[in-house]
Amino acid sequence: MNHHTTDVVLVGAGVAGLTCADRLSRQGFDVLVCEARDRVGGRTSSVLAGGEVVDLGGQFVGPGQDRVYALAAELGVEVVPTHTAGDNLVETDAGRLRRFRGTVPSLGPLALLDLAQAQARFERLARRVDPRAPWTSPGAARLDMSTLAGWIRRNLRTRMGRRLFTLASRVLWAADPSELSLLHALFYVRAAGSLGAVMAIEGGAQQDRLVGGAQELAVRLAARLGDRVRLRAAVRAISQDDDGVLVSVDSGVTIRAHHAVVAVPPPLAARIEYSPPLPALRDALTQRLGMGAAIKCMVVYPEPFWRSAGLSGYSLSLGGPLDGFVDTSALTSERGVLAGVVAGATARTFAVRSVDERRTAVLAQLTRLLGPRAAEPIGYADQDWSAEPFSRGAYSALFPPGAWTGFGAALREPVGRVHWAGSEIAICWYGFIEGAIRSGEAVAAKIAGG
Amino acid sequence: MNHHTTDVVLVGAGVAGLTCADRLSRQGFDVLVCEARDRVGGRTSSVLAGGEVVDLGGQFVGPGQDRVYALAAELGVEVVPTHTAGDNLVETDAGRLRRFRGTVPSLGPLALLDLAQAQARFERLARRVDPRAPWTSPGAARLDMSTLAGWIRRNLRTRMGRRLFTLASRVLWAADPSELSLLHALFYVRAAGSLGAVMAIEGGAQQDRLVGGAQELAVRLAARLGDRVRLRAAVRAISQDDDGVLVSVDSGVTIRAHHAVVAVPPPLAARIEYSPPLPALRDALTQRLGMGAAIKCMVVYPEPFWRSAGLSGYSLSLGGPLDGFVDTSALTSERGVLAGVVAGATARTFAVRSVDERRTAVLAQLTRLLGPRAAEPIGYADQDWSAEPFSRGAYSALFPPGAWTGFGAALREPVGRVHWAGSEIAICWYGFIEGAIRSGEAVAAKIAGG
């Protein structure tokens, strides 16, 4: 057995935990970050494929995400724009390809009108939601008794409109809209500005990327913290009394501290053993939140060959397996990099195939959309986040119907000396890297403020 | 450290785990049952109040529940009918009282018609659902994208009809209908016969009770198993390989066996650490199932005084805090016993009050409905199942929208040498004591069959 004493123990070396630890450390607190994996970064993970750094997790940043731009600047991580010049593509389920500009694909005037009206209606509803306390929004009970899928059924009239709105929601939440409370979808969008903004590249949430990969933020924060970050240190139990907390780590290590900050997604936070047990409302909340299912697929080519055909690389596809992909080629390299995602139910069936089969299926799809040169990449990497024992899904935890109105009040409220951090705890930019930073800073301020 | 070896380890000494252990043991298997609490019985718990044995957990049995009648007979536990003679009562939110017979309260002809039509429609929908695989039922995707609350809104036209259907669903599932997938509500009813049957006393799921309390089943099964049941032995980790399983118990004990049977509700099964990690589909399922919230309140009087006023004791109330209560007086005693339940959102606010405040509120309600003699009980006991760290809710785990169709296939499927048991695993009578017995017997047969 091995005993440590510190001021604040952080559970999880993702962006939220490390930001919180860094902020506390710089104010003179002694901290210790326990990370279950053998790496930092949580749901950001940057690896080499075909000679390029590619992001297997979260990677985009955009306007309104002030804290991530500030943190990147502070850490010397450069930000570059995502490539957008050229036409976007959409593939129907019948295998037809259509070019479009902006965020709304044009598959006939009726579907376009249908989608435009639905988006306007969704934006209006979202503006009603108070992201600080969605359960107090006007009509919250009614919004929280419907799924997003039910809303799509009732509010879109064309088959193609429904299919595209469903596809967009899969890309946004990595889940099928039948799993999401309408209130959660509205909250999420409100917490990030608007539906238009979360879907857009230029002027929206996919506008920029971090040079060297999004994991760089965590890597550099961890470097500052040095040996105060412990890898392969899964936290199994947290007990607390009036004097402090006692955190038990897998390896038999125990840590005594004044505060604990649990900076892992709520469904995983539920798997730690708490003593005394958590209040029923908090426990019930964590029983209900499920992680989305996303497989991120990164494909590297000798060059971004689609650009010469007038294509931006940004594509949506009803043919799958990728629901969508986007050109994330580096500015300083001649290579072309596509970042795609397989989401929701498709991710669950795709996940059980071998990496080779997945690669083959993705390349076949890219060939359908971008032509034969797509069949010959120089690098491929993918990651099934649901299979990661210390993520168990991505992008974020999702609220089913009844959860915000029944249990939402317990999401951010600390329990004695145990605080909650992570992208899901943020009031703004829930589910984004920005949200992780904001929640980490907020908890640090709270602890430092006494 | 303390090491044991056995054939089968069972996690949880509720009715499912003990039935499974007993069946295996009688076929010559060596078993060991690890129970986290200091008692057996799981979600059945029988205690003394006012000189009577009262049930703080599940207690009713009825026609179609063949296995529980057989087990009771086998163990020498007597079964007696629930008292039904007299008029039932319903209290409106305006405080009006109405007498009625049967299961459908009469609050005006329009509400009655509305409720009758809705019930008929619900029964028709339920008959479509295949309880073995609800996700394959015709129209499953559509049924699983709606909450029960949304269905009530769309299918009942009177305010009183909606309120009473909502009340009934709170009594049935201990949850607000906004939390439940319509498909789950239909499955649950189908797995128990019909809505009429699950709501009814005579001829339905509340027809009979177990003399000495429902916990007697577990107590007598445990007595047979003797020292093969270990109390205060919370299982924290289960690892498996081709040769067997290794189960780690809180106290430092480890047990090697050929099979493990996890017989706790799915949300709690998720909190055990599995090595190798569980398949993503199973993990994602357990992230989504939340336990209902029920506080069972038992009140004992010198006699069942309501009977002399021509009342059965069975009452529904929109005034609360009890959503409903029923006469569970023993046949062999002169005392009167009422069993009530506070469910869903009300349970969560009621839970934070002191036992004295809860008792006062319940007695005030009973006085409103049954008259001044209700203010003077000789015994009161209640139990908030959400506060129990090894139940974390009651009556059962509930499927939100999207969960059956997305993840249902992982509910009953064993993972290598790890099997799942419990009332939630049963194909018939999900959430009932009967379901627990059936699942325990099914897993025992599977393991014994090789």
Image (tube, coloured by chain):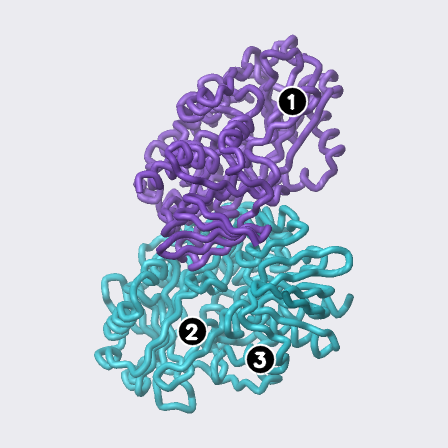
Chain colours: A purple, B cyan
Write down the residue under mark 1.
A96
Q: Is residue B65 visible?
A: yes
Give the percent coordinates (x, y) of residue A333: 63, 12
Q: Between B187 and B36, which is closer to the camera in this rendering? A: B36
Residue occupying the point 65% across, 16% down: A336
- Give residue B441's quadrant in the image: bottom right
Q: Which mark is residue B56?
A: 2
Residue A58 shown left or right of residue B48 in the figure: right
The three-letter amino acid code for the residue at tag 2 is Leu
Q: Mark 2 and mark 1 in contact (Cβ < 8 Å)?
A: no
In this rendering, the label closer to the viewer, 3 or 1: 3
Residue A214 shown left or right of residue B86 in the figure: right
The three-letter amino acid code for the residue at tag 1 is Arg
Q: Chain of mark 1?
A: A
Write down the residue under mark 3.
B69
In the rendered image, the quadrant that contains the C terminus of chain A is: top left
For label 1, the crowd category at 10 Å Cα-Cα, with few meaning under 14, some 14 to 19 and many 20 or more, is some
B202 is higher (above) or lower (below) than B345: below
Residue occupying the point 41% across, 29% down: A192
In this rendering, the label closer to the viewer, 3 or 2: 2
Q: What secondary structure is found at the residue carrying circle 2?
A: loop
CA–CA distance between discs 3 and 2? 20 Å
Residue occupying the point 26% across, 68% down: B357
